Amino acid sequence: MQDARPETFVTARKADALLNAMSVDIEDWFQVGAFETVIDRADWDQLEHRVERNTNDVLSLFDEAGIKATFFILGWVAERYPQLMQKIAAAGHEIANHGYDHARVFTLSPDQFRADLDRSRKILEDTSGQSVTGYRAPSFSIDQRAPWAHAILAEQGYAYSSSVAPIHHDHYGWAGSPRFAWKPVDQSDFIELPVTTVKLGNKVLAAGGGGFFRLLPYPLYERSIRKMQRDDGHGAIFYFHPWEIDPEQPRVSNAPIRSKLRHYTNLKVMRAKLLRAGQDFQWGRVDELAALEAGLME
């Protein structure tokens, strides 16, 4: 039977039915790319660690919202908090690789990248008891400087990566790369799932979460995602960090002003906005969306 409701309503309902992928990049407040020039890795263990408490808060938020998500986790974190890894896995979330210590991929050689993958994956699997088949590069750092990284991920048996931001940005980005799932390696089923963007005219803008979601009004985010779903017919890939729901975290006084504005603005409202997004969209794990996208490409 033909649907007699207005076409705009039918299109909106189709968008509502799309599965979106919820993901969390598990790193502490001092490990973010914005502070990498002012906080030395050698000092990390001497700083206040808040990642375990904040990740537990994220798990509680997901329980409240009924969301199963993907946790892209630094090996450095898993090494120090093995019980947290077991808790994430036991709650039904996907454990995925975020590298060992947040080194950007384009700063590594291919051999160094292999070693980083080997080290972090072993720690994640040993501490969680879960097989790791997904990867996200720190700071979305697979770009035109490191296209070789995809072949190494495929070689090591990963099913997918979510490591590319197809935008212009001063901090990251691979402008001009595909906006939706693509196969970057010939003769391989390995896929890249870029973080979500929305197209406005000739411009491609970030719409996948993180600072974009925290800094801008929620209705703008909702409209952006619904526009992408309606125009392009794909689910969104959303990400955030545990420190983004922690307004009491230490302040880095010597960081660049732009970095401080991006990092600390609207921390107090983030949890409520996440719960609202949890209610407004259908969410699943990244591996679930990867499987759906792979099926569409067959």
Image (cartoon, rainbow, N blue to C red):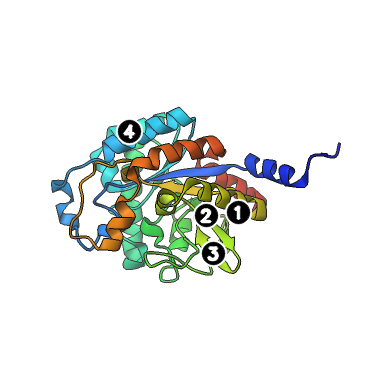
Among the two numbered marks 2 and 3 on one chain, the one whose residue lies closer to the N terminus: 2
Which quarter of the image is occupied by the N terminus?
top right
Q: How many discs appear? A: 4
Tag 3 residue: 204
Among the two numbered marks 4 and 1 on one chain, the one whose residue lies closer to the N terminus: 4
Residue 162 at least partly seen: yes
Q: Is residue 176 above or below residue 229?
A: below
Q: Secondary structure at mark 1?
A: helix
Tag 1 residue: 228
Q: Which mark is residue 98?
A: none
Question: Residue visible at 59% across and 48% down?
Answer: 235
Q: Decide: marks 2, 3 in contact (CB < 8 A)? A: no
Q: Secondary structure at mark 3?
A: strand
Tag 4 residue: 56
Q: Which mark is residue 196?
A: 2
Q: Nearer the viewer, residue 128 or 71?
A: 71
